[in-house]
Amino acid sequence: MLEAIGLHKRFPQGDTAIVAVDHFTYRFGPGLSAIVGPSGSGKTTLLNLLAGFDLPDQGQVRLGETVLSQQSEDARSELRLRYMGFVFQQWNLIPTLTALENVAFPMMLAGKRLKERQARAGELLEAMGMGRRMHHLPHKLSGGEQQRVAIARALSLNPPILFADEPTGNLDSASGAKVIELLRAQAQGGRTVILVTHDLELAQKAERILHLRDGQLIREEIIPSLLPTP
Ligand SMILES: Nc1ncnc2c1ncn2[C@@H]1O[C@H](COP(=O)(O)OP(=O)(O)OP(=O)(O)O)[C@@H](O)[C@H]1O
Ligand SMILES: [Mg+2]
């Protein structure tokens, strides 16, 4: 579904350049994949390439039959809206919109009708255990609650691919565990969930762990726990 082929990304630095992603090749399938590596190993840069926010110097990102990394900026935005959802560490929610309005926002961009937006946003927030907080503004919510709203928003257009970059970074361990459980549930439901974290313990909750060093995929670890038992 989402495939990286020989992705390479440099950032110019004076006379030289930093290689942030170094010939990265991987096919992301359904389930939860964690990308781990030390600070500066290229995790966020890789995620930006996979989502088409940024373009590689070499290589391709393929979304099914489409080469995402060869599309125009507008076309990439369109594909993101249709196929991808995002949860980030912070600055996730629009501060002037309630939880419900935040979740409904991508549906507005996609031209969904108000009734449908509100119904779906309400359903998703209920499913995240946020039914009683729907009409609160983000600053009235705890970090963990805000992150649950962000997950609901990321799911509002039912995307097959979900990206999360350090989604538990600001949270206490109990709230973090809850966020990971929600991501796991999405993965078990057949979505392709790509989690970026520097927390190795958290990464053990994934089915596959990709270890990045200096932009290179140095090891893939398969964790059997999430695989269906026969
Ligand atoms: N826009 C940019 N311009 C120049 N250098 C950049 C840029 N973005 C990232 N880099 C460099 O690329 C390398 C990889 O950065 P990246 O943010 O992808 O790492 P990371 O693994 O996400 O780190 P962290 O765990 O700290 O978030 C780093 O050396 C960083 O300084
Ligand atoms: Mg990062």
Image: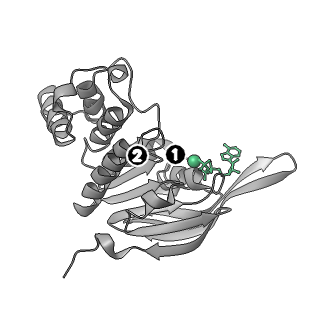
Query: Mark 2 highlights which residue?
Result: 173
Residue 187 position, x and y percent, is: 29, 60
Marking on residue 53: 1
Which residue lies at the image location 49% right of the left edge and 52% below the top edge? Answer: 71
Sort mark 2 into few (<14), some (14-19) or many (20+) by Cα contacts within 10 Å.
few
Number of numbered discs on residues: 2
Tell me where residue 190 sits by quadrant: bottom left
Q: Quadrant of residue 230?
A: bottom left
Q: CB of mark 1 within 8 Å of CB of mark 2?
A: no
Query: Vertically, is 169 above or below 188?
Result: above
Determine whether, in the image, residue 226 is placed left or right of residue 14: left
Front residue of 154 and 65: 154
Relative image position of residue 50 (x, y in whole percent): 49, 56
Cβ of mark 2 under 8 Å from ligand 1: the answer is: no
Q: Secondary structure at mark 1?
A: loop
| Residue 143 x, y percent position in the rendering | 38, 32
